[in-house]
Amino acid sequence: MPSPNLDDLPDSLSHHIGYLFVRLGKHAQRLFSVEIATLGLRPPHCDILLTLADRGAMAQVEIAQLLSIERAHLVALLDQLERLELVRRAADPHDRRRHAVLLTEPGVQVAAQVADIALRVEDALLDGLPVVERELLRKALRHVARDAEEGD
């Protein structure tokens, strides 16, 4: 079902920043999800892949905490990524009770594809904004998000 035109909505919605965040977030997620589906992935898979690409091997508990994913859900996501041969789990050499998760070589390549897809989707969403305004928006959103998380 297509979204109604923003200009057709009552001001109480179209001028409400929270509503605009949600609406834009849903749109961005739809665009991103369609693109990554061709890789057999969903957004939470991409969060994991990009985190590992950036940070290197991590303990499962660290991934769960960093990405706010319930441990049981993370295990299911990692099982799926292992079946796709994008990650592997190994005993942590410093603590055998823990598992380290790392990208495989195909995982590194797919993470790079996901990063490219994310940039393309961002470019499509922000097409009408000049680079300077994009950076101002990014800075403002990071500030608001950081403050919101500190308030939790």
Image: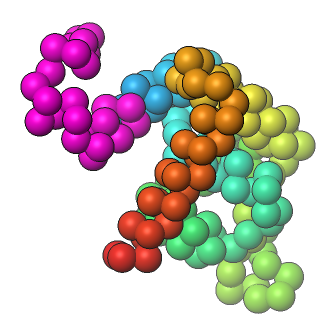
Residue at (89% x, 43% y) in the render: 105
Vertically, is 92 above or below 64? below
Q: On the image, which quarter does residue 95 sit in? A: bottom right
Residue in the foreground of this view, choosing between 76 and 147? 147
Q: Nearer the viewer, residue 107 or 88?
A: 107
In the image, is 137 to the left or to the right of 135? left
Quadrant housing residue 15: top left
Residue nearest the observer in this picture, 129 or 87 = 129
* Rendering coords of residue 87 (x, y %): 74, 51
Main SS of the magenta segment? helix
| Whole-percent x, y for residue 149 in the image | 43, 70
Q: Is residue 100 above or below residue 134?
A: below
On the question of residue 64 being in view, the answer is no
Left or right of 104 on screen, residue 22: left
Q: Residue at x 11, y 36 (%)?
A: 12
Residue at point 58%, 24% (across, down): 129
Name the residue: 46% across, 60% down. 145
As for residue 14 lying within the magenta part, the answer is yes
How many marks on residues? 0
What span is colored magenta in the figure? 1-25
Quarter occupied by the N terminus: top left
Q: Quadrant of residue 132?
A: top right
